[in-house]
Amino acid sequence: MNDDEPLEEQFRMLAKYVEPKPNLTTLVMERVRRNTEKPDRAGYLESMKRWAMLPVPRFTVGASLVAGLIVAAVLWLKPDVSNGIAFADVQEALRRIETAVIVCQCHERSFWDHRVYYQRDSDLTVHEWKNGVVHVDDGRGKTLILNTRTKVARYSGGAPSELTSREYLDRLTSIEDDATGRLGGRAIDGQKLVGFVLKPRATQEVVGMARTEVWVDPTTRLPVREEFLPNDPDDIVTGMWRSTCFYTFNVPVDQSLFRMTPPEGYRMLEGAGLHHLLARPHAELPDDPDLAAPTVDFLRGIGPARFGMKFRDVLDVLGRPDEMNYGLKFSPEVCEQLNKEFDGIYKEVARRVKEENLDALEEEKLRSRMLQEMHAKYQPLDVSDTIYITYSARGLSLVCEEDHGLLRVFCESPESNLYGGFRGATTKGIAIGSSVEEIEKAYGPADIKRIADDGSGGLMYVSLAAQFQIEDGRLHAFDFDKDAKTGGYDTIKLDEKK
């Protein structure tokens, strides 16, 4: 890695902290495809499902701003003097940094607010969330996760960090400058600061939908705050990522945080199905049971949301989501390359899960990191008219398009979704955990059925425009479309259903 690489590439290791959720649009489709090969399905369906899995890069959002923002704050200061600040002055000030505390506020999703602690004489980096969950990263691929309220702990691995706390602070003094706009002086909260518009790096900025502003104290020559702002105040999708980070340097930090052993009195968690005890904050479940555990009505919709319903109407009936993202447009050449690389990532993750015995959290971190690395290499031409909507606490993700409204729904299991999974059921009572026999009793023999000896595989129903992922003989996740044509199910030939 070198400083000529985009910030997305330099700080891709922080992408794992974007997952206070995992993004169900990405996660569900990856897991639906993982154990269910579909060579019989037409290329259109395969391509569409594949693209539903690919995440929208959002490296300057919320928790992902954690380390990149301090670096970005000095990266774009020109060597010449601007409002009395020279780049060399900032570098000199940064050389004297021994500790850094970053407070990140996500304005539209306050449950994501968190702190990050850096200390020069330590290799550890500490992330602390409002619900008492703490992540201590050793910079070598191991993370100690604590819940300071319930006094439980767990070790996790699978996604090595790029920089230790010490390396990160050292790096601040050797960053090349780059061109940027200048905002001049401005009083913020009674403090006079000098502002800069950072050179577009993140996806939302590259396509002209957002900007990042950094504000520097002209006295200390150090960054004070950074803001990620939508260019269109009426754009509620990009506006959901609006955030502000505040920096404090050379302040005492709690030394008890900087260690890779649980404090006395903590209970170590082992085994599957316990990750929710260590999950970062998320939106609470709604009180309305029709929203918290909605009914799936194949070919019609889910809960009060109907297929074909416009994007804003979906939000009106389902409520505010945890996350929204635009789809991306790439050139045909890039699409082809991404498809090839995705296949390689898919196989590599499966290999490492088997050989290294990774648990669900480790698998998710590894998959997320590899997908983020892949996307960091390619810039989109623009955003598409597709919008991905995620309700993490409900285990639910939806896909809408500008012209066609609600098109697709994903429902996830609690083993994969750290926040509890999908709690609802279909009109015939099929829910996460239902057996293959129960599914086929409710809906008849599947058009395509592939179940391995270990009980993993999938069922596909063309008439329902739905597919079910099976693990250990039970329903793990499922997705369904507006109709067979929308999902590409109508392209399956009769002899392929046998």
Image: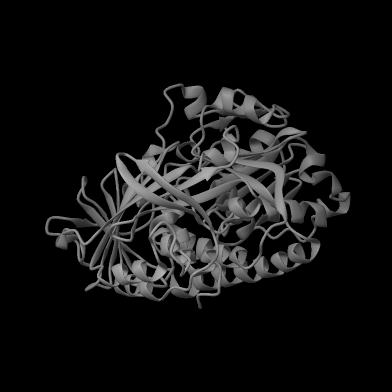
x and y, in percent, of residue 100 in the image: 27, 61
Which image quadrant for residue 441? top right
Instruction: Give the residue at x 32% y 61%.
Output: 221
Of residue 385 and residue 358, the one placed in the foreground of this image is: 385
Which image quadrant for residue 118? bottom left
Q: What colouring style does the render use?
A: one colour
Of residue 121 and residue 139, the one placed in the foreground of this image is: 121
Of residue 264 and residue 322, the one placed in the foreground of this image is: 322
x and y, in percent, of residue 276 in the image: 36, 47
x and y, in percent, of residue 42 in the image: 82, 55
Vertical position of residue 256 compared to residue 302: above or below: below
> Is residue 354 found left or right of 333 in the rendered image?
left
Vertical position of residue 415 compared to residue 238: above or below: below
Instruction: Give the residue at x 77% y 33%.
Output: 403
Vertical position of residue 245 compared to residue 320: above or below: below
Of residue 221 and residue 152, the one placed in the foreground of this image is: 221
Instruction: Give the residue at x 59% y 65%.
Output: 376
Residue 427 visible in the snapshot: no
Q: How many marks?
A: 0
> Is residue 15 found left or right of 34 in the rendered image?
left
Instruction: Give the residue at x 36% y 52%.
Output: 275
> Is residue 172 found left or right of 229 in the rendered image?
left
> Is residue 443 found left or right of 352 in the rendered image?
right
x and y, in percent, of residue 229 in the image: 51, 44
Residue 409 visible in the snapshot: yes
Vertical position of residue 180 compared to residue 384: above or below: below
